[in-house]
Amino acid sequence: MRRTRVALRAALALGAVLLLAAPVGAGDFRAFVEELWPAAQSRKVSRATFDAAFRGVTPDPAVLARLRRQGEFGRPVWEYLTGAVSPGRIARGRAEAGRRAETLAAIEARYGVPGPVLLAFWGIESDFGASAGTVPVVRALATLAEARHRGELFRDELLAALEILEHHDVKPERMRGSWAGAMGQTQFLPSAYLRAAVDFDGDGRRDIWDSAPDALASIASFLQQAGWRRDLPWGVAVTLPADFDLSRYRGPFPDFARRGVRALDGAALPEQGEASLFLPGGAGGPAFLTTANFEAIRAYNTSDAYALAVGHFSDRIAGGPALAAPWPAGPRLDQAGLTALQRGLSARSLYEGPFDGRAGPKLREAVRRYQIAEGLPADGYATPALLERLRQRR
């Protein structure tokens, strides 16, 4: 079953740029709203809740205008990482770790997700609850749903928001979030709220807007449902020996240790579990051994940059070191270049995925297979030189 994405960015991750239509008239919008009633009624939403939710609601042109912006997909990994894991945010994360140690320990005992990981999500999504969003969720989702952005996705999210209002977990005026309906301190979309939000403070409400314990536990609940394993880290920042064979990029942690891979902080690598080498800036840049928990993070937001930021931020909150290896300084492929690379690798039966111009796991795997076939260092990093080589060897 397709997983509904939690945050706005993930909800838009696989979509194309919206082709904005002519301005929607008030009559057209009200007709669209009324067409929703049978579907809302089938979800046991009362007419009173339905009418109260849409009272005075009009399309929001600012929502449509912002669809073209998506930070972690539009910038290099290292630029996103620098902004997301800033010194000030690290300091605040460590302060919250001390302040909420008892709560975090109780959440970890129940869900298996370490406190620093939860704080990393919380800090990146809402600056530890300080910036949870001010846009009315119903208006934002109705605007996107009426515009048919991403097909039926936002219509379904709008109906899920009505279910939340029917359950009285939040009042309509308090149901606020981002410009595309990601709500509260967790930035959950409504469907994720219905699936994963929990009442951890015991007040009878799943309050991701005003309760930090509920927000943190709800993040943990989501990750548990996404397959988080309590016996594994999200990954480990590592250093590689000079003669490391990049073509052998998957295997057990002990195998990587025997091959000379060392944790950046000097600690021993885990004694069990499978890992995959991730070189987000290519050979010579920062290196990570990621686990199945990295994929659980990506269920929250499909961006590699986001998942890496959460993982590295959690390490820094826990006292881990900053990354030391340099990021690449040369030219990089833009979205059009990445799309061309996807098409070229697909023509060689190496890439199976959408031609969306995003450097995700499928493209990284295809690049590695091409590099191995060509006798190149298999770092999985897409570069202009690699695209040019592919074009010349058709």
Image (spheres, helix red, strand yellow):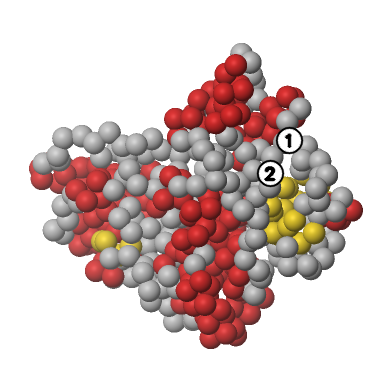
Q: Quadrant for residue 335, please give it.
A: top left
Residue drawn at the location 73% of the way across and 24% of the way down: 374
Q: Tell which of 231 and 376 is nearer to you.
A: 376
What type is the residue that disc 2 sits on? Ala
Quarter of the picture holding the N terminus: top right
User: Is label 1 in contact with label 2 (beta carbons under 8 Å)?
Assistant: yes
Residue drawn at the location 41% of the way across and 38% of the way down: 15
Q: Is residue 276 above or below residue 111?
A: above
Q: Is residue 167 left or right of residue 57?
A: right
Residue drawn at the location 34% of the way across and 36% of the way down: 17
* Residue at the extreme top: 394
What type is the residue that disc 1 sits on? Pro
Q: Tell which of 389 and 314 is nearer to you.
A: 389
Give residue 108's position: percent from left, percent from top: 64, 74
Give residue 256's position: percent from left, percent from top: 83, 52
Q: Is residue 82 left or right of residue 317?
A: left
Give residue 321's position: percent from left, percent from top: 65, 69
First in sequence: mark 1 vs mark 2: 2
Q: Is residue 332 left or right of residue 39?
A: right
- Secondary-structure class at tag 2: loop
> Label 2: which residue?
283
Residue drawn at the location 72% of the way across and 47% of the way down: 277
- Secondary-structure class at tag 1: loop
Distance (Cα) linking label 1 and label 2 = 8 Å
Q: Is residue 21 above or below residue 135?
A: above
> Label 1: which residue?
377
Q: Is residue 26 visible?
A: yes
Q: Is residue 61 above or below residue 238?
A: above
Give residue 320's position: percent from left, percent from top: 66, 70
